[in-house]
Amino acid sequence: MKKRIIAYSSDHDSLGNSFRMKRFKFLADKLAKFPKPVNILDVGGTLKYWEARGFQNNNDFIITIINLESSDSPYTNIKILKGDATNLSNYKDKSFDLAFSNSVIEHLTVFDKQVLMAKGNDTYR
């Protein structure tokens, strides 16, 4: 099937999903080397992202998703909390084995906020 350039990111046949899968393969290869369980912080993620990769109900991975809204998760190994990518001060250093973010920084339209997210700073000036 021909890849669609402009399509929703959840569209399995989209070009964006093709790139996402390549990035995830890189991450999965790295995760395989971590001692289990791996405690993951996903900044700006979605439940659907992890479901699409088969991580739901997999207790080798404890996933905390931070997004603009919290919601219930049907899975014991995934929780979804309200948070801000530019202020993660609720979490102590080394609270997670891995911090992960997929396609979020471009949604922070102010460059200073992008810098804050990248650096992990807890205040916006």
Image (spheres, rainbow, N blue to C red):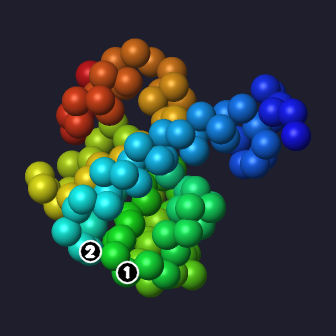
Quarter of the figure that contains the C terminus: top left
Residue at x 31% of width, y 51% of height: 30
Q: In the image, what residue type sits under mark 1?
A: Asn
Label 2 – label 1 distance at C-alpha: 7 Å
Badge 2 vs badge 1, beta-carbon distance below 8 Å: yes
51 horizontally vs 125: left or right: right
Q: Residues within 10 Å of mark 2 (few under 14, many from 20)?
A: few
Q: Secondary structure at mark 1?
A: loop
Mark 1 lies on residue: 59
Q: Residues within 10 Å of mark 1 (few under 14, many from 20)?
A: some
Mark 2 lies on residue: 37
Task: Note whether 7 is above or below 41 in the view shown.
Answer: above
If you read the primary sequence from the N terminus, does the residue marked by circle 2 or circle 1 appear first? 2
Q: Position of residue 96 (x, y in %)?
A: 22, 59
Quarter of the figure that contains the N terminus: top right
6 horizontally vs 84: left or right: right
Q: Position of residue 31 (x, y in %)?
A: 32, 57
Residue at x 22% of width, y 62% of height: 34
Task: Note whether 20 is above or below 116 in the view shown.
Answer: below
Residue at x 36% of width, y 52% of height: 29
Task: Note whether 53 is above or below 23 in the view shown.
Answer: below
Q: In the image, what residue type sits under mark 2?
A: Pro
Residue at x 51% of width, y 25% of height: 106
Q: Position of residue 19 (x, y in %)?
A: 59, 34
